[in-house]
Image (spheres, rainbow, N blue to C red):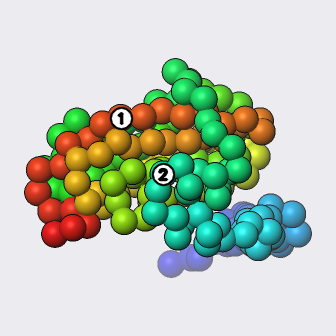
C-alpha cells in the first residue's frame, strides 16, 4: 500500500497558522478591556437603595422626577400569584438610554433594581422582583439626560416581602 502525501498537511498547517494569527490580533483590540473599565466607573447608589419611600428613592438616585412616556413599555402581571417572584420587564424606543430602574412603592425599600447601560446597548431589562403586597410598580428610564416613566398596578395574592 502506498501512502500519498498531498496538500492536506500543508493546508492544515496554513489554516492553523491563520487562525492563530487572527486570535492573537483580536487580543490587541480595545473591546476586551472596555466592560471592566465601564463597571469600575459606576458608583453603587447605596443611599437610593436605603430609602423607604418611592419619592425619596427617586430623588436619591436621580435628583429629579420623571415624566410619564408611552415610549417606555413596562410589562408586569396584573395579578401576581406569588409575591416572592413577580416577573417584570422594561423596553423602550428612546435613544441614548443610560439607566433603567424599578421602584416598588409598598416594599420595605422602594428601589428594587437599577441598571446602568453603556452607549449603544439595547435598552431592555427583565427581572423577577419580590413584592410585599399589592402596589404600584414604577419603571424609570434615563435617556439623553431626561427621565421617563411607566407605571403599572400589580395585585399580589400570596407571599411577598411581608410573608
Residue visible at 18% across and 49% down?
Answer: 156
Residue visible at 77% across and 39% down?
Answer: 145
Distance between mark 1 and mark 2 Cα atoms:
14 Å
Quadrant of image for the C terminus: bottom left
| Foreground residue among 2 and 90 | 90
Image marks 1 and 2: residues in contact by CB distance under 8 Å = no
Task: Please rate how many residues cluster around mark 2, counting C-alpha atoms within 10 Å: few if below 14, some from 14 to 19, many from 20.
Answer: many
Q: Count the marks.
A: 2
Which residue is disc 1 drawn over?
Answer: 152
Q: Position of residue 108 (x, y in %)?
A: 36, 65
Which residue is disc 2 drawn over?
Answer: 54
| Foreground residue among 162 and 83 | 162
Q: Is residue 146 left or right of residue 157?
A: right
Q: Is residue 94 visible?
A: yes
Q: Is residue 132 left or right of residue 36?
A: left
| Foreground residue among 63 and 98 | 63
Element marked by disc 1: strand
Q: Which mark is residue 77?
A: none
Residue visible at 35% across and 60% down?
Answer: 107
Can you tell which quarter of the image residue 8 is in? bottom right
Element marked by disc 2: helix
Q: Position of residue 118 (x, y in %)?
A: 73, 52
Task: Please rate how many residues cluster around mark 1, counting C-alpha atoms within 10 Å: few if below 14, some from 14 to 19, many from 20.
Answer: some
Q: Residue furthest top?
A: 70
Residue visible at 76% across and 73% down?
Answer: 40
Which one is earlier in the sequence, the residue at label 1 or at label 2?
2
Q: Is residue 32 visible?
A: no
Q: Position of residue 88 (x, y in %)?
A: 36, 46
Q: Is residue 132 left or right of residue 55?
A: left
Nearest to the eye among marks 1 and 2: give it: 2
Amino acid at each position: 500500500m502506498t501512502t500519498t502525501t498531498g496538500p492536506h498537511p500543508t493546508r492544515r498547517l496554513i489554516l492553523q497558522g491563520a487562525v492563530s494569527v487572527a486570535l492573537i490580533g483580536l487580543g490587541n483590540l480595545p473591546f476586551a478591556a472596555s466592560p471592566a473599565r465601564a463597571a469600575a466607573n459606576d458608583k453603587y447608589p447605596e443611599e437610593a437603595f436605603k430609602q423607604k419611600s418611592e419619592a425619596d428613592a427617586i430623588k436619591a438616585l436621580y435628583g429629579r422626577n420623571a415624566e410619564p412616556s408611552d415610549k417606555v413599555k413596562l410589562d408586569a402581571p396584573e395579578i401576581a400569584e406569588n409575591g416572592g417572584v413577580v416577573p417584570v420587564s422594561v423596553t423602550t424606543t428612546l435613544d441614548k438610554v443610560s439607566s433603567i430602574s424599578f421602584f416598588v412603592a409598598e416594599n420595605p425599600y422602594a428601589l428594587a433594581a437599577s441598571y446602568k447601560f453603556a452607549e449603544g446597548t439595547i435598552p431592555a431589562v427583565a427581572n423577577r422582583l419580590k413584592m410585599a403586597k399589592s402596589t404600584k410598580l414604577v419603571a424609570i428610564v434615563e435617556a439623553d439626560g431626561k427621565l421617563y416613566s411607566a407605571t403599572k398596578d400589580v395585585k399580589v395574592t400570596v407571599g411577598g416581602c411581608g410573608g
